[in-house]
Amino acid sequence: MTHRAMRSDVSQALAGLVELERRARACDTPEALGWLMVNDTCQLVPYRQAAFWRADTGQIQALSGLGTPDRNAPFVVWLAGWMRVQAQSHVQQAAVSHTAGVPGARAADAVSRLLSVDMQAAEDAAMWREHLPAQCIWLPFFMNGTDGPVMGALVLWREQAWTQPERALLESLADAYAHAWRALSRRGRTGVAAIRPHRRRLWWGAAALLLVLLLWPVRQSVLAPAEVVAHQPAMVRAPIQGVVDQVEVQPNEAVKAGQLLLTLDARELESQLETARQALAVAAAELRQGQQQALLDARSKAMLGVLQGKRDQAVADVEYLEQALARSRIHAVRDGIVIFDDPNDWIGRPVALGERIMMLADPQEAALDISLPVADAIALAPDAQVKFFLNIAPASPLDARMVRMGYRASPMPDGVMAYRVRAAFAPEEALPRIGLKGTAKLYGERTILFLYLMRRPLAALRAWLGW
């Protein structure tokens, strides 16, 4: 080889080295740098396979020819363990490889190591022969430039032995790779270090704010379904046993005292009254006949008492049936509005004595009936504040005060156990129509926000633990 040819080869090698160094320092992520190291280093020195190992994760970062190595593959797992052992061995050898009298200098084996399959243990040698060429060069990346712990290593394999010029080129390139890797690692650490105090302050501030909020005193409150009901209504009950014949009023109709509300079927009573009247006429005739006979016959005079009793009994039966017939027509006992369901539900329906048919209520005497579920019950003062939100006007709540609360829960139509709470509207409020429904908000004693939010979870936890 002529001198000119040798100089040309050296120029090409130096140009390739400079180009790879430039590309390495241009990488902006560790993944891009790993890909460059294992795949593009062949532009400087030929090899068949390459791998880059990270010391911080103990994993293979990049393999030549693969985008992302499978870290659970048997070969990758073995290779990562083998490179971890080699890194530990390299650090131990490098610690004692300083050149005598030259502090900070390293022997050649302290910068790179030449390994072969014959130098490995039997188990590693078998795996090596199956997957890798016979010769390799170990290029470590040190934490502090040329000293300190190993932060990674680039390993190249091929069949031919490595020459000294190739080793020198690779060591120079590995130093540039290590410099770029340290820069990327330091950039990540610097960003985290810069952000971490700020985030820590934010976390502490958020925790302090959360603590203040959880200890903030709030007033307990609970929502429950409610309905506007009549206050002390007059009950319209069946005065006798019978069948509803006709309903003369409509629901929510205003009526006056004495107005006919409904009638019961009186045909049977009329028939019984006609029979009773005929029996009265017979008893009266028998009594008159007995009185006439008593003037001549002493025996007939003794029967006058019996005949008098039969006539009185007949008179009482007639009077009772007349009163029952009059009670079959039910009238209003006071002014107000009539509260009941659909009239068609009552026509033809048999009613028992005393059964409630409808109510008479004063529209100016409305109250609030609240069904407070047992699971939501809180401690309430005797005159606890209540706000009522009508379904038809949820944006205009009405003020009320609790009057009483049932001491025992009872099942509601939906099957939920609830306490019956009665509340009176404030005098200044315009009373809503009886029968309207909505949601009542009852206010209790003050407590901290944490207990207010965790009341039901703590109750469930207590029930689960059996406290």
Image (cartoon, helix red, strand yellow):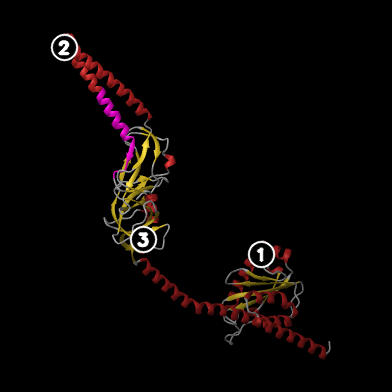
Dot in front, 2 or 1 = 2
Q: Quadrant of residue 128?
A: bottom right
Residue 141 image position (x, y, % from top left): 62, 78
The answer to whether 49 is drawn above or below residue 367 in the figure is below
| Residue wearing tag 3 | 452
Q: Is residue 331 magenta-colored? A: yes
Residue 5 image position (x, y, % from top left): 82, 88
Amino acid bearing label 1? Asp
Residue 126 image position (x, y, % from top left): 71, 62
| Side of 440 relative to 31 (left or right) | left
| Residue wearing tag 1 | 70
Amino acid bearing label 2? Leu
Q: In the rendered structure, find residue 295 and report the number of the disc placed on it.
A: 2
Q: In the rendered structure, find residue 317 and report the number of the disc placed on it.
A: none
Label 2 element class: loop
Residue at 62%, 75% (x, y): give it. Answer: 30
Of callouts 2 and 1, the N-terminal one: 1
Chain part drawn in magenta: 314-333
Q: Nearer the viewer, residue 313 or 8?
A: 313
- CA distance for labels 2 and 1: 136 Å
